[in-house]
Image (cartoon, coloured by chain):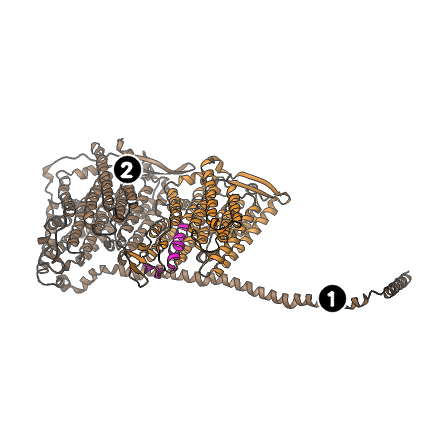
Chain colours: A orange, B brown
């Protein structure tokens, strides 16, 4: 049933091309809600034991000579990713609700990205997996290049080239796996013993290929530029789901196929991850563009995912999957505030300019949302980020105690840059010339009118995301009970982990 | 096992739920907001009182209720709630003092447009703090601990119109965050060693002998890391810098932060995980406890010295809080656990009283906080004056009548028996003198002498504000009943011993030492400042006598020993440079590398394009030209005349024949 997330989303995208534009956003909303509902249904109805293994749901022969099949499966990790995709997708549509131009085209590309992501998270066959994986990149390019803002062509091109660059390495890895093992089926490959010498070089090639998309340091520079260039919906999807494609694939494919290679290289991954956490946080402290701050915070948070993966124990890896969910939701929320709630109304994301606007009075709901998102991003308990990070760090303590210490310092930096952004954007000094007080309400520019207060669609979208991060933060068992057995079934775990 | 333990979670939950409910109210619903907050706090107080009862019945009562947060494999991360004398006493103090502050706030914040939001945050703060107290798991404690931090951030930054408020909120959060990360790492370490974060779990908890045995030598480091968290939250040196700045929040918030909740959390934490600190103690001394003592001594003296030279009524109180917390830490460090907690509880009352009193003064003086512009207020604000004086004497440690006097004696007594060194004992003497000195200085400036600029229009505050003051003042005095050496009920309640009444113990030698010290402090201050507020006129007080005598020293103290400046030049500058460097690297190095690769690609593309254009393409072009020439040549032969074709065929045949003949 969950396979229908892919079909519905693709179908919705195609239908968009034929329907008049008045229906566009409604159709997009319905499609994404259907996807989320299917995910939820699977979440509720699939017994937890069935989620311990990558259980086949659809299997159709395709080009059997080459081992290509249309083969989908589901386990706890996939389900978690499908859920975050659904949540991000719905809120993304809501935050694009009053788009003015080329709506059909916009939602068409958007749904293609979402459909591709569903596809990646459910694919068993490596060829199918790669098709979906590359499929996401093309619509991303158009989303950014057509609908983006600041330096959009550059950002779009950089993102696309990086993605193809990573994809090239991934492709090599897939070919190697196929040639050596004679299969493209992930479940079969996961049983196959690749020679250690091959794993020694094939793992880093494939892992790096994926990790590019996850924003691993120092191959992260596409992320901030891409996020800034993208339209709000683009940033939300990019940070919310597309970056997770990389970390998910690194876990599902690279680590699972080449366990010995992974164990050889895992400490270097941890090193890169920790550098990424601290370094990106430090860079974020210096940014004057709000979206750049959030872009770098994404790199920092993805560092936690990579650190969790590198621990090679159940706890760390499960925490990494939880962090993928958590960051997907929180980053979407942060970008929604920065890109939609602030930028659309003020036409600036410059922190110094925003500081003069005293936005917390003009946009109280946006301020509230941003406080919540910041708290979640900093890792305040009660939000999903804390649960994920503490699990990752408990896991990391077993393997890399030093990493935990450095990460602790990094978390102070995360608080520092987040609060700086929060203070500058909403709680800055009032009384700048940009601001005029009008009957107790702040006028931002001459066009200011009622329509510029936060819309109902935006409120619903924000509430959905806030609810998701709170629910998982208070009760992480919801997801962990499904993630952990699936992680335990993987073979790269270090003994005793 | 008492029934209340099953409902213990309600104590933090009720204010938290009230907070959420208030948050959903519209800005205009001020009455409902205040009513909800007060109701939530009253419910918490009632529940705390119910929870207090069973702890009275048995000595060393302890009940726990644990539950699983999530499981992994055979392990589980478990959380829980605990009720013991320490928790029960703290619950009562926090909810009672909190309630006074809530009621006071109704009057104090009456004009404020953030009224509803304020009460939502206040309830949130109170709930989080109550959670810290009842947590039976270091993780759950940490969770509430962080929520306290978040609440303080929101409350300190409440007056967002003031940029200094936003900056102070940020500073408070980040400074305590630094400590929290120590706590966090210590917690992870502890979990890794002992496999549980529950304090008490039928003998398997990390504070019980089996759990402690697994820690070994790492206990010292774990304890110190956790202590670092307490240093941040309780404003100990070197992380004390946020506390005085936190005065930017509304005064009731200061009262809540400085008396009942946030700063108390650090001292409470040390008391709660005391077995970790005292593990392997010889004569009650361990290296971690020694660190606690010296940090406490440094903080207590430094803050008391700084307080002498401050002019802001709230800042003086802020530094006195820092100083008193240092004193409590010293007490915990030398093994006087009960004495430290007793002082914490007593301090909760009289410091809340002093802050609310200062709030009343500020309210009466129309938001003026500079004590040099006040003066003579005892005539205009009698209730505030009397209650404030009670608070001042309790804080100074005036013996016999005031709770603070008894607890200070208890602490001095404990410090005097510390084996390693006598130095803290005598340094604490200095601390007591200094405290009495600066509090007397403050009270002279505010309430005595002539009315100066801000005090001309002063008025007494409404009953909604003065009644909480009276309640707290009564608390500051009446608490003495359970503190005296003759009937040390609170001490024995906390340590789990049975209490005896023995009037002979009432008068101890320490009483006279204490009396001498406090009199010295008050006497010197009265003598020095006797003329400070007398001059008339519409101008602030003259130059401070101390400044007159020692200008350089005074400036050093008035500028908070330049510790903020030191941090700005070192830690902050360092992280700023690191950020600058990382940003530069990202912009130019990594991105440059990427662009470089791009450029190489482009050069390569240009090269291949050149080869393509000049070499291959030209070759192909030439070939095509040649082919066309050939074609033209051939097409000439392709004339369509049968004769010529036949002729060519004939020539061909002839050639083949000749070839054949020649070969044969």
Residue A280 image position (x, y, % from top left): 41, 56
Mark closest to the chain's N terminus, 2 or 1: 2
Say left or right for B374 vs B274: left
| Chain assignment, label 1 | B
Q: Main secondary structure of the magenta part?
A: helix
Assign a secondary structure to mark 2: helix
Q: Mark 2 points at which residue?
A: B10
Say left or right for A479 vs B278: right
Q: Mark 1 points at which residue?
A: B627
Q: Nearer the viewer, residue B658 or A149?
A: A149
| Chain assignment, label 2 | B
Task: Give the magenta-colored segment's residue range.
Answer: A330-357
Say left or right for A18 vs B427: right
Q: Are marks 2 and 1 on the same chain?
A: yes
Look at the image and tell me in which quarter the C terminus of chain B lies: bottom right
Q: Nearer the viewer, residue B467 or A390?
A: B467
Label 1 neighbour load within 10 Å: few <14, some 14-19, many 20+: few
Up-down: is A358 above or below B39?
Answer: below
Label 2 neighbour load within 10 Å: few <14, some 14-19, many 20+: many
Q: Quadrant of residue A446?
A: bottom left
Dot in front, 2 or 1 = 1
Residue B489 image position (x, y, % from top left): 16, 37
Q: Nearer the viewer, residue B368 or A260?
A: B368
């Amino acid at each position: 049933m969950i396979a229908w997330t892919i079909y519905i989303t693709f179908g919705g995208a195609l239908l968009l091309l034929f329907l008049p534009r008045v229906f566009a956003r409604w159709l997009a909303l319905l499609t994404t809600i259907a996807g989320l509902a299917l995910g939820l249904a699977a979440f509720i109805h699939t017994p937890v034991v069935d989620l311990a293994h990558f259980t086949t749901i659809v299997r159709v022969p395709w080009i059997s000579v080459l081992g290509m099949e249309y083969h989908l499966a589901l386990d706890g990790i996939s389900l978690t990713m499908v859920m975050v995709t659904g949540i991000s997708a719905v809120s993304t549509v809501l935050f694009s609700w009053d788009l003015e131009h080329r709506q059909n085209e916009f939602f068409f590309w958007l749904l293609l990205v979402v459909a591709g992501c569903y596809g990646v998270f459910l694919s068993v066959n490596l060829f199918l997996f790669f098709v979906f994986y590359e499929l996401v990149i093309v619509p991303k390019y158009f989303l950014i290049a057509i609908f983006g803002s600041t330096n959009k062509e550059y950002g779009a091109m950089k993102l696309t080239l990086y993605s193809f660059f990573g994809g090239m390495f991934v492709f090599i890895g897939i070919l190697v796996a196929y040639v050596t093992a004679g299969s493209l089926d992930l479940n079969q490959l996961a049983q196959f013993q690749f020679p250690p010498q091959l794993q020694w070089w094939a793992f880093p090639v494939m892992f790096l290929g994926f990790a590019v998309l996850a924003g691993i340091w120092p191959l992260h520079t596409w992320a901030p530029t891409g996020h800034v260039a993208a339209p709000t919906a683009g940033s939300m999807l990019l940070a919310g789901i597309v970056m997770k494609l990389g970390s998910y694939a690194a876990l599902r494919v690279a680590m699972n196929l080449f366990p010995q290679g992974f164990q050889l290289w895992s400490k270097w991954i941890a090193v890169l991850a920790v550098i990424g956490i601290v370094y990106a946080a430090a860079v974020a402290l210096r940014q004057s563009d709000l979206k750049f701050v959030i872009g770098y915070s994404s790199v920092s948070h993805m560092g936690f995912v990579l650190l969790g993966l590198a621990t090679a124990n159940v706890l760390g890896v499960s925490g990494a999957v939880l962090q993928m969910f958590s960051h997907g939701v929180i980053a979407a929320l942060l970008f929604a505030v920065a890109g939609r709630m602030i930028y659309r109304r003020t036409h600036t994301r410059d922190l110094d300019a925003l500081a003069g606007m005293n936005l917390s009075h003009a946009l109280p709901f946006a301020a509230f949302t941003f406080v919540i998102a910041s708290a979640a991003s900093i890792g305040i308990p009660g939000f999903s980020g804390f649960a994920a990070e503490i699990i990752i760090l408990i896991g990391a303590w077993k393997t890399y105690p030093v990493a935990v210490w450095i990460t602790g310092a990094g978390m102070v930096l995360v608080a520092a840059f987040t609060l700086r952004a929060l203070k500058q954007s909403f709680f800055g000094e009032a009384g700048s010339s940009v601001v005029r007080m009008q009957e107790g309400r702040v006028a931002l520019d001459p066009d200011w009118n009622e329509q510029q207060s936060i819309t109902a669609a935006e409120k619903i979208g924000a509430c959905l995301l806030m609810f998701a991060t709170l629910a998982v933060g208070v009760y992480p068992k919801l997801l962990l009970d499904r993630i952990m057995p699936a992680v335990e079934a993987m073979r790269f775990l270090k003994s005793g982990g | 096992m008492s029934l209340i333990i099953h409902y213990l979670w309600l104590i933090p939950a009720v204010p938290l739920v009230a907070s959420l409910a208030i948050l959903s109210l519209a800005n205009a619903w001020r009455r409902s907001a205040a009513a909800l907050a007060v109701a939530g706090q009253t419910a918490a107080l009632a529940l705390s009182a119910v929870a207090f009862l069973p702890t009275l019945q048995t000595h060393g009562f302890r009940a726990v209720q644990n539950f699983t947060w999530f499981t992994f494999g055979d392990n589980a991360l478990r959380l829980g709630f605990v009720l013991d004398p320490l928790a029960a006493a703290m619950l009562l103090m926090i909810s009672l003092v909190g309630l006074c502050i809530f009621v006071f706030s109704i009057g104090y914040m009456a004009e404020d447009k953030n009224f509803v939001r304020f009460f939502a945050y206040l309830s949130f703060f109170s709930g989080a703090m109550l959670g810290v107290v009842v947590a039976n798991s270091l993780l759950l404690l940490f969770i509430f601990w962080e929520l306290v931090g978040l609440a303080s951030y929101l409350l300190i930054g409440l007056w967002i119109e003031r940029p200094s408020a936003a900056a102070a909120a940020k500073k408070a959060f980040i400074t305590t965050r630094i400590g929290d990360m120590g706590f966090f790492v210590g917690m992870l370490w502890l979990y890794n060693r002992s496999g549980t974060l529950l304090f008490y779990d039928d003998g398997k908890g990390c504070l019980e002998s089996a759990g402690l045995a697994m820690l070994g030598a790492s206990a010292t480091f774990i304890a110190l890391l956790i202590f670092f968290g307490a240093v941040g939250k309780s404003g100990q040196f070197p992380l004390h810098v946020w506390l005085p700045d936190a005065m930017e929040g509304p005064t009731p918030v200061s009262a809540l932060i400085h008396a009942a909740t946030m700063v108390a959390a650090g001292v409470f934490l040390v008391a709660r995980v005391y077995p970790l600190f005292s593990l392997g103690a010889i004569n009650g001394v361990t290296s971690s406890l020694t660190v606690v003592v010296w940090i406490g001594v440094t903080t207590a003296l430094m803050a008391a010295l700084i307080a002498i030279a401050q002019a802001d009524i709230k800042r003086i109180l802020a530094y006195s809080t820092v100083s008193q917390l240092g004193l409590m830490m010293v007490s915990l460090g030398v093994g006087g656990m009960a004495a430290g907690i007793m002082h914490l509880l007593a301090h909760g009352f009289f410091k809340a009283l002093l802050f609310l009193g200062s709030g009343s003064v500020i309210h009466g003086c129309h938001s003026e906080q500079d004590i040099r512009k006040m003066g003579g207020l005892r005539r205009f604000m009698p209730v505030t004056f009397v209650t404030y004086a009670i608070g001042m004497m309790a804080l100074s440690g005036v013996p016999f009548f005031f709770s603070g006097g008894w607890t200070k004696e208890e602490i001095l007594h404990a410090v005097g028996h510390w084996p390693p060194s006598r130095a803290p004992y005598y340094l604490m003497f200095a601390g007591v003198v200094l405290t009495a000195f600066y509090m007397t200085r403050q009270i002279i400036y505010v309430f005595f002498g002539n009315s100066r600029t801000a005090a001309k229009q002063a008025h007494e505050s409404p009953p909604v504000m003065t009644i909480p003051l009276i309640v707290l003042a009564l608390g500051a005095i009446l608490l003495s009943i359970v503190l005296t050496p003759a009937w040390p009920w609170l001490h024995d309640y906390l340590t789990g011993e049975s209490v005896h009444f023995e009037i002979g113990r009432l008068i101890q030698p320490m009483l006279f030492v204490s009396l001498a010290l406090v009199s010295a402090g008050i006497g010197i201050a009265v003598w020095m400042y006797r003329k400070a507020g007398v001059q008339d006129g519409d101008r602030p007080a003259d130059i401070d006598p101390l400044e007159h005598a020692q200008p350089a020293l005074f400036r050093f103290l008035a500028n908070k020993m330049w510790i903020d400046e030191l941090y700005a030049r070192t830690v902050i500058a360092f992280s700023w440079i690191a950020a600058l460097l990382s940003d530069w690297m990202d912009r130019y190095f990594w991105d440059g590398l990427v662009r470089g690769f791009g450029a190489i690609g482009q050069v390569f593309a240009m090269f291949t394009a050149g080869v393509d254009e000049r070499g291959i393409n030209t070759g192909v072009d030439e070939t095509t030209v040649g082919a066309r020439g050939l074609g033209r040549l051939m097409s000439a032969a392709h004339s369509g005349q049968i004769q010529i074709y036949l002729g060519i065929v004939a020539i061909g045949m002839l050639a083949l024949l000749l070839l054949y003949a020649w070969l044969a």
